[in-house]
């Protein structure tokens, strides 16, 4: 059974599921769709302890469909030459178990699915970095893409303008980790660790993280042995994500956040504006997050979206509170001064 | 295997670029020169007026000239610049963004390293759409490059791999050059012009690690694949790309040419290269499938 209705309703809430249990939690908390991936390099959250076996996916699709929710499969990495079959096999399983859409980035993967599984709906991953109407139309025309997940680099007026010129739906990230680099075009992790975000689905992988304490009590957070940041005694040490570390430049010898501070994206205040701009679906990042996190975040956004759909003013206090105590940002969406 | 000079990633002054390409035209043993602004659309107008003369000069020097499109296309001026370039019938073009593919509409073109041609399926698709030549992503390991190259050769496509210069590691919508100076992209005042080889970033324990070039992040060390050239040749790679750095690029090209065509030993070549690029480390980790910044000694690998 496929729940056709929900794709046509604006304000679709697309929620993360790192495990079958998180998927059930997200569906129960009111997700319109959940996205997940297989336990291998075919998706961009290829972390130990996360993701789905084919059997788990099949059972999860059944669970979601019985409750009117959809399941989107992330096949959004770039197969290196010689390994394309892993992605093709994943697509075949997706078609067999009745996944509602595959989220793809690689042209070869997109073309394979369009040709061999024509009834399988395609969404264009943020990893494809399609940030103009022309790029988006390229994927729509050639592979029948029905939805684009926009890179997190556009302002709301720019999103509104793009919407006028494309034949597909728009999905945007609204909450969670906020990568600074154009997705699908970043090899920083591979430079430091030998594992590639694009080909292996990892970003600053935990297995390559170490914390080193220096003689003076300062703590260095390292990735692949490279110091990403250092913290004075008593200062809270952050996770060494390369684009959120502190570095020195010749005129900045004290060290500074060269790319971005360790902030989290929270667009809850902008939800009405995004809907008005023509954004069809809202994506919550966090397949690596716990069930309780998923329950809280999905539940809060469910209430907010329902209020907006009903023409009421959403109570955004809960959503704003979700990132309280953490630094949050509206990223590029609010103003182009972010750039 | 032919040597090419890839597009200049940095914002050099007009005079400097003019002199640079004049010397390349006269002296550098490269067959193809890629021209055009790939990184930042704000920089492009400065050199536009010079382009016809530079192209003519390079062609007079016997070089094939290929014009490159922007890697990031978002703003109106970027969309327009891409669309305009795609109408070019006079020169070959290298496309770096899917927006260019739409406008080119099946007419012949080269695929740039930012288009993510990682595998045989994508390369086959691109060939069907008019691609005649593909530059593979710099981060691909040699093993995958070999398989991709075979597929490309079977389709009669040229295959190119970066063998020299800083690794392009990321692009962003944000300008990190402007950010480093408390500015934004819109009021950057072209501060990137002060760093003709990128702005160095070091870790807080003083290890030089990255370079900022406007919206682009690059490696600190230069990729150097001298010892790998024979293997690359055997894999069917047709073109080896040198990326322009702020060093004597004619001398760099000569070293690669001597290893490739005059029997110069790769280790001796690397010694010469170290003198030319004094102060900069070399890396070949990507090719060997390990952390990109590392340098694997081929002889040690063979033993």
Image: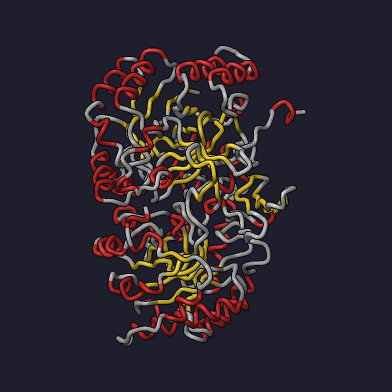
Q: How many marks?
A: 0
Q: Position of residue A139 (x, y in %)?
A: 36, 56
Does residue A13 appear to the left or right of A191 in the view shown?
A: left
Asked if residue A13 is positioned above or below residue A94 in the image, the reply reads below
Seen at 51% across and 48% down, the residue is A256
Return the x and y of residue A208 as percentages of the image width and height. 68, 52
Question: Which residue lies most toward the right here?
Answer: B303
User: Could you tell me which residue is drawn at 51 percent across and 33 percent down?
Assistant: B166
Which is more toward the observer, B40 or A52?
Answer: B40
The quarter of the rendered structure image containing the C terminus of chain B is top right
User: In the rendered view, would you say A167 is above or below A14?
Assistant: above
Q: Does residue A233 appear in the picture of this structure? A: yes
Q: Residue sitting at 45 percent across and 34 percent down?
A: B198
Q: Position of residue B222 (x, y in %)?
A: 54, 31
Given residues A131 and A90, the one toward you in this image is: A131
Q: How is the image coloured?
A: secondary structure
Q: Nearer the viewer, residue B45 or A126?
A: B45
Q: Residue at x 34, y 82 (%)?
A: A308
């Amino acid at each position: 059974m496929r729940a056709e209705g929900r794709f046509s309703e604006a304000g679709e809430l697309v929620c993360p599921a790192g495990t079958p249990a998180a998927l059930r939690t997200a569906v129960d908390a009111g997700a319109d769709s959940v996205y997940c991936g297989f336990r291998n390099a075919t998706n961009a959250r290829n972390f130990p302890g996360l993701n789905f076996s084919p059997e788990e996916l099949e059972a999860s699709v059944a669970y979601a469909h019985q409750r009117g929710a959809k399941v989107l499969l992330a096949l959004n990495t770039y197969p290196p030459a010689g390994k394309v079959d892993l992605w093709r096999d994943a697509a075949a399983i997706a078609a067999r178990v009745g996944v509602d859409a595959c989220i793809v980035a690689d042209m070869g993967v997109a073309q394979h699915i369009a040709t061999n599984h024509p009834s399988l709906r395609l969404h264009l991953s943020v990893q494809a970095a399609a940030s103009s109407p022309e790029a988006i139309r390229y994927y729509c025309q050639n592979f029948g893409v029905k939805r684009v997940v926009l890179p997190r680099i556009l302002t709301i007026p720019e999103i509104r303008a793009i919407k006028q010129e494309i034949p597909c739906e728009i999905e945007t990230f609204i909450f969670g980790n906020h990568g600074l680099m154009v997705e699908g075009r970043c090899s920083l992790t591979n430079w430091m660790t030998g594992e590639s975000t694009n080909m292996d689905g990892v970003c600053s992988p935990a297995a390559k993280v170490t914390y080193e304490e220096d003689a003076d009590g300062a703590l260095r957070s390292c990735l692949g042995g490279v110091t990403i940041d250092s913290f004075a005694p008593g200062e809270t040490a952050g996770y060494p994500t390369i684009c959120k570390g502190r570095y020195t430049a010749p005129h900045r010898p004290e060290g500074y956040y060269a790319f971005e501070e360790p902030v989290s994206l929270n667009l809850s205040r902008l939800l009405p504006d995004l809907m008005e701009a023509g954004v069809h679906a809202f994506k919550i990042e966090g397949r690596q997050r716990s069930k309780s996190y998923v329950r809280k975040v999905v539940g809060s956004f469910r209430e907010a979206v329902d209020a907006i759909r009903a023409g009421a003013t959403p109570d955004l206090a809960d959503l704003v509170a979700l990132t309280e105590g953490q630094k949050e940002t509206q990223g590029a969406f609010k103003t182009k001064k972010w750039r | 295997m032919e040597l090419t000079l890839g597009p200049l990633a940095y914002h050099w002054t007009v005079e400097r670029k003019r002199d640079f390409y004049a010397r390349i035209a006269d002296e550098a043993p490269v067959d193809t020169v890629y021209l055009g602004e790939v990184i930042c659309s704000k920089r492009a107008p400065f050199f536009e007026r010079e382009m016809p003369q530079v192209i003519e000069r390079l062609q007079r020097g016997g070089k094939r000239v290929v014009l490159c499109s922007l890697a990031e296309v978002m703003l109106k001026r970027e969309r327009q610049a891409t669309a305009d370039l795609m109408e070019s019938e006079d020169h070959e073009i290298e496309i770096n963004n899917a927006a260019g593919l739409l406008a080119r509409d099946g007419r012949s073109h080269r695929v740039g390293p930012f288009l993510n041609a990682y595998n045989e399926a994508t390369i086959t698709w691109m060939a069907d759409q008019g691609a005649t030549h593909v530059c593979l992503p710099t981060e691909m390991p040699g093993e995958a490059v070999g398989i991709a190259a075979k597929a490309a050769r079977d389709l009669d496509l040229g295959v190119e791999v970066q063998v020299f210069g800083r690794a392009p590691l990321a692009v962003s919508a944000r300008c990190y050059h402007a950010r480093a100076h408390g500015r934004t992209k819109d009021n950057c005042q072209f501060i990137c012009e002060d760093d003709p080889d990128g702005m160095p970033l070091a870790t807080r324990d003083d290890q030089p690690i990255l370079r900022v070039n406007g919206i682009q992040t690059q490696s600190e060390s230069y990729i150097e694949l001298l010892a790998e050239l024979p293997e690359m040749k055997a894999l069917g790679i047709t073109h080896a790309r040198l990326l322009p750095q702020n060093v004597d690029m004619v001398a760099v090209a000569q070293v690669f040419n001597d290893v490739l065509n005059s029997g110069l030993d790769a280790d001796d070549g690397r010694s010469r290269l170290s003198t030319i690029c004094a102060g900069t480390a070399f890396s070949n980790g990507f090719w060997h499938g390990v952390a990109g910044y590392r340098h694997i000694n081929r002889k040690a690998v063979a033993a």
